[in-house]
Amino acid sequence: MVEYKKEFKESRLKFFFNEQYWNNVIQFDEHPDYKKIKEALSGTKGVDFLGVLGENVYFIEVKNFKDYRIKNKERLKNIGEDLMIEVAQKVRDSLACIISGKLNSTRHKILWNNYLKKIINDNKVIKVVLWLETDNIPNNINNIRGKNKQSRNTVSIATYKQKLQSKLKWLVPTKANVTILNTGNYETNDLAFKVNYLQNDKN
C-alpha cells in the first residue's frame, strides 16, 4: 500500500507527498535558512515547496483564489501578468537562497547542495509547478475564452502556462519546465502526491 507521509498545509489545501518517489521535500518558505535570508534582505520571496522527484528539482508555488475572485482580480488581469511576475520572482529568489544555503547554512548544507547539484546539471530540467485554484479556470487547453456560459474573463491553463514561461526566460527556456495544476486536473499528472481541499479552513 502506498503511503503519503510527508504532509503540508498551504492555502486551504493539504498536500501529501509520496516519499517513495519524492526526496528532500520541504515547505521552503517555512525553512529557517530561508527566513534568515528574508529577514536580512527585505523583499525576498520564496516558493511554497521544494523537492526532488526522479532526478529533477521541483519549485512548487500554491495560489488558491477559489472563492476569493474579487479580492485577487487585479493579480489575474492581463492573463495573470502580476501573478506570473510574482511567481517568477519567487523562483529567482528561491534559487538565490539555495546557493546561499549551500555556502552559509550551519545545519542544512547537504540539503541545499543536493538541490544545487541537480539544478546546475545540464542533463536535468528545472520543474516549476504553479498550483492555481480559481473559480472559473477551465482544464481544456483549446482557447482563451471559456465556452458554455463561462466567464468572458476565463483564461485556459495553457494560456497561463505560456505567460509564466515568458516570465522565466531568464532561467534559460530549455531548462524551465512549467506545469499549472489544480484540484481538477492534477491526477492526470504523475507527480506522486495527493491534495485535499480543506473546505472549512479560512487560512
Image (cartoon, rainbow, N blue to C red):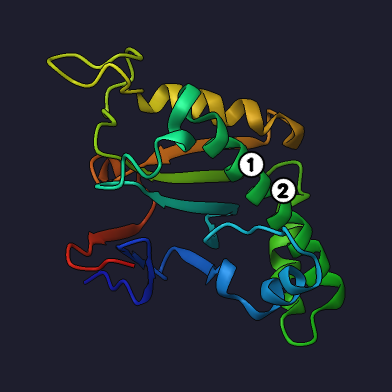
Q: Quadrant of residue 40?
A: bottom right
Query: Mark 2: which amino acid?
Result: Arg
Quarter of the figure with the C terminus: bottom left
Label 1 CA crowd tier, 10 Å (few <14, some 14–19, many 20+): many
The residue positioned 31% from the left and 71% from the top of the image is: 4
Position of residue 72 measured from the top left corner of the image (x, y, whole percent)? 40, 42
The residue under label 1 is 88
The residue positioned 66% from the left and 34% from the top of the image is: 168
Q: Is residue 2 above or below residue 44?
A: below
Position of residue 157 measured from the top left corner of the image (x, y, whole percent)? 38, 28
Q: Is residue 63 above or below residue 136?
A: below
The residue under label 2 is 92
Quarter of the figure with the N terminus: bottom left
Horizontally, residue 127 falls left or right of residue 193, namely right
Position of residue 95 measured from the top left corner of the image (x, y, whole percent)? 73, 55
2 and 1 marks in contact (CB < 8 Å) = yes
Horizontally, residue 160 falls left or right of residue 175, namely left
The residue positioned 27% from the left and 16% from the top of the image is: 152
Q: Quadrant of residue 146?
A: top left
Say which element carries label 1: helix
Mark carried by residue 113: none
Query: Mark 1: which amino acid?
Result: Ala
Instruction: Tell which of 155 and 67 is nearer to you.
Output: 67
Label 2 CA crowd tier, 10 Å (few <14, some 14–19, many 20+): some
The residue positioned 30% from the left and 14% from the top of the image is: 145
Say which element carries label 2: helix
Q: Is residue 181 above or below residue 1?
A: above
Instruction: Tell which of 166 and 66 is nearer to you.
Output: 66
